[in-house]
Amino acid sequence: MDRRTFGKKVSVIAAAIAGSGALAACGGGDDDAVGATPTTPPTAPLTPLPTVRFSTDRLVLSEPMLQLPTADTVRVVWFTEFEGKDHQVRYGASFDRAVPATSRKMSRMYEDKTSKVTGRTYTGVTERDIWRHEATVTGLTAGVRVPYVAVSSDGTKAMRSDDNTLQALPAVGQTTRLLLTSDLQLKKMAAANYERVAETLAPIDGVLFAGDLVNVPNRASEWFDNNVPDAPPFFAAMQGTMTKWQPTSTYTGGALLQNAWIMPILGNHEYSGRWRPQTNDLGTMFNDPQPLWYAEMRYAQQAATINPTNDPKVRATWIADNSFETISYEEMFTLPEGPDGKRYYSQRLGDVHVIAMDGNRIWRGWGANSKGKLSETLADVNNPDAWGFGDFQFWPFGKGSRQYTWLQGVLDSAEFKSAKYKIVMVHQSVFGLGDNAIPTMAQTKVSFDYEDTNGQRRILGPLALPISPATWASDIQPIIAAKRMRYVKYDYPLAEDVWKTDIEPLLVAAGVQLVHVGHSHLWCRSKVGNLNYIETSNVGNTYGAYVAGLAPKRTAIPAVSATQPHTSLTWNQADYPLDGDPHGRPIVAPNLRNVMAELAGTGNVPFLSSNDITAYSVFDSKAGTISSYAFDTRYPARAPIKFDEFPLIG
């Protein structure tokens, strides 16, 4: 089927929903074949479907999305700003089957003075009562798409979603088409990107979203109803409802999540820092995490006061509120789970095995004398409660970690080994041309410039984070207490990149064919042995690509100069390459068309990096290929361009 004719195909689907059985899944044979009716008995008697649509009520915050497919079930999830009643999913050829939804209130959905919601203003950090509804549809058959709608009542009127289709996990041998995407983050081109995906490639079976869904994860409007032009909220962009929240929007977004399961992973923007709503706004709290080891050490020092009854829940809450958390992400999505819950997981999708990893760290700025990647603010150098601890990793993932041991087990499993295609998702730049490709994923090292009790300059370190409580108490706390610390410096040795030394060799040896990453908001790819890397995160904007021989370069690492007489510490310039992949991986140029040359006039460059031209990629298990497309958002009437395609085998 020509995917440019999908607009015409909608009428075919609608007709099938209205008068026929369930639809066969895309790629399972004839796209428009009629499938079997689910075997679950009907719930009787059923009331007629409501005529009022979700799209007409602003208290219905999303259309339904699909989650956690199994061999014969799938979850349907949607959100409202009322508790309501009678939430259910109706499904089958005549919508003559029903399953009730369970509802729960989201626990950390807030707004603040910077939130933009039509008809509302907020001053301090204000909670929003947002309810999540989830129903499990059973009795499904692999390869068969089943019509469904979600239904809710606000207590006075009943409403329904538009007509959609759902499906179970694909069977081995069934064609599966997966969108590879990431980094939506309210960025201006996101709605255009997903609208073109829906027009040219739908129906998509699944969405592999490699992190950074929003900017501030506890700000509700970033997920649902932000009304700032050119700043699309997550669900509006991915469900084609932009004009509900931004009536003048040029692009509507794409109706993807209603008909395709989404499997996201954590990005650094799904982590939020210390919870201090009485003094800080949501953005400040998001960007204010501290390492878990430091929060645990501080708790131990104050436990008798904080938690005199030694309640484990009090301990866990205090440590999370004083380090970092992923509450909103975890409550938002129903996902497969690994040893640490939803942080990382694996999922077999027919011929495809997907491994979703958590390789995240906080992103800090580059200032040499500020709370950033390289150092701490000079004014706070003796106040570790104000430190950022550099680009610290939230959780370990290298050798010796729980995630590494789990990954070894997955790679050794029969389910993984028998898959035709093997894909890994990780958010942060483990390869690539972006500014965010450095520092590499080395464990942060810290050095301290201080004065001893005789007034002599001393250097302590470099010490690898985390620092043990014993070392902190004996070597660091006395310096801080006496206010003798002069400078705190962080390093990320290139040769100690955890991904390059620990993870990449493991994946290559296991036959993984693709690593799908985000974070730098561009398109580029590389290949190491039979392992392909692709960053296809230029869905909304870009942060630049940096190639040898081209200007500009990446951020330069400062050296000690007359403007920095307060320290003798400096950085090894070789640890922070100014261009290219940090480890010299070859960058593969687009092999069909060079859209940067054609549309941006840059000349032939091996990447797509633009604030006007957006990229999206799809994996087709029948062809075994990753195909990438570009769309120039300045010209809405133009068709997207397929600019790259490569096989995962061969």
Image (spheres, rainbow, N blue to C red):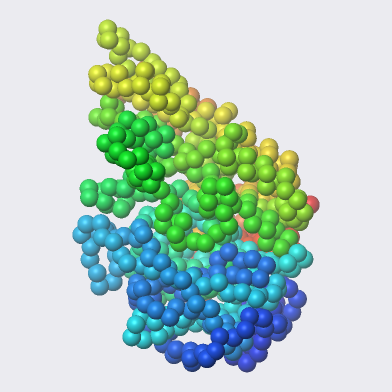
Q: Residue at x 71, y 82 (%)?
A: 35
Residue 606 to residue 59: above or below: above
Q: Position of residue 446 (x, y in %)?
A: 42, 26
Q: Residue at x 45, y 61 (%)?
A: 332
Quarter of the image holding residue 26?
bottom right
Q: Report the side of 457 relative to 641 (left or right).
A: left
Q: Position of residue 575 (x, y in %)?
A: 52, 29
Q: Report the side of 380 relative to 10 (left or right).
A: left
Residue 191 to residue 54: above or below: above
Would residue 10 be visible to someone looking at this image? no
Q: Work out which quarter of the rendered image holds the N terminus and state it.
A: bottom right
Q: Toward the viewer: 471 or 6?
A: 471
Residue 174 to residue 533: above or below: below
The number of callouts visible is 0
Q: Position of residue 600 (x, y in %)?
A: 52, 57
Q: Position of residue 14 (x, y in %)?
A: 59, 87
Quarter of the image holding residue 299?
top left
Q: Residue at x 38, y 63 (%)?
A: 106
Q: Toward the viewer: 590 or 273?
A: 273
Q: Toward the viewer: 280 or 431?
A: 280
Residue furthest to the top in view is: 454
Would residue 18 be visible to someone looking at this image? yes
Q: Toward the viewer: 295 or 507?
A: 295
